[in-house]
Image (cartoon, helix red, strand yellow):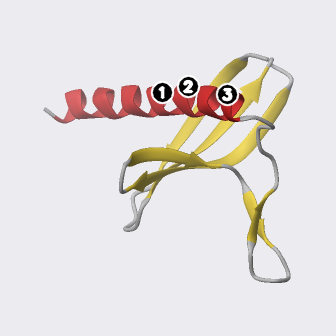
Amino acid sequence: MQITDVRIRKVEKEGKMRAVVSITIDEEFVVHDIKVIEGEKGLFIAMPSRKAADGEYRDIAHPINSQTRESIQQIILDKYRMEAETEESFIL
């Protein structure tokens, strides 16, 4: 499995969410609405979720194992940081 595209939409509102991301896998499958969140220990991703009848949020799509999750998170956060640095260089 290869992530062949990462598209980031930064969020400019208050709160902990920093961006909403879409990834393309193997140029054939897209996952939308992955969130980049600023937590106490730094940035992390939250997979797309939906509120269930019991009030709990459940992931709609998610990696099966932690190694795949870490790989996806690393790719997304690297791209997020790269875009953030690019924006800062334009401001200065």
Position of residue 89 in the picture relative to residue 6 (left or right): left
Residue 75 point in image, percent of width and height: 55, 25
Mark number displayed over residue 87:
none
* Quarter of the picture holding the N terminus: top right
Work out whether residue 23 or residue 51 is closer to the camera in this orientation and state it: 51
Q: Mark 3 points at which residue?
A: 67
Position of residue 82 in the picture relative to residue 69 (left or right): left
Work out whether residue 51 or residue 14 is closer to the camera in this orientation and state it: 51
Q: Mark 1 points at which residue?
A: 79
- Quadrant for residue 80, please give it: top left
Label 2 with label 3: CB-CB less than 8 Å: no
For marks 1 and 3, the one nearer the N-term is 3
Residue at 60% from the left image edge and 31% from the top image edge: 70
Residue 31 point in image, percent of width and height: 76, 40
Amino acid on which the number 3 mark rests in the picture: Gln
Q: Disc 1 on helix, strand or loop?
A: helix
Residue 6 in sight: no
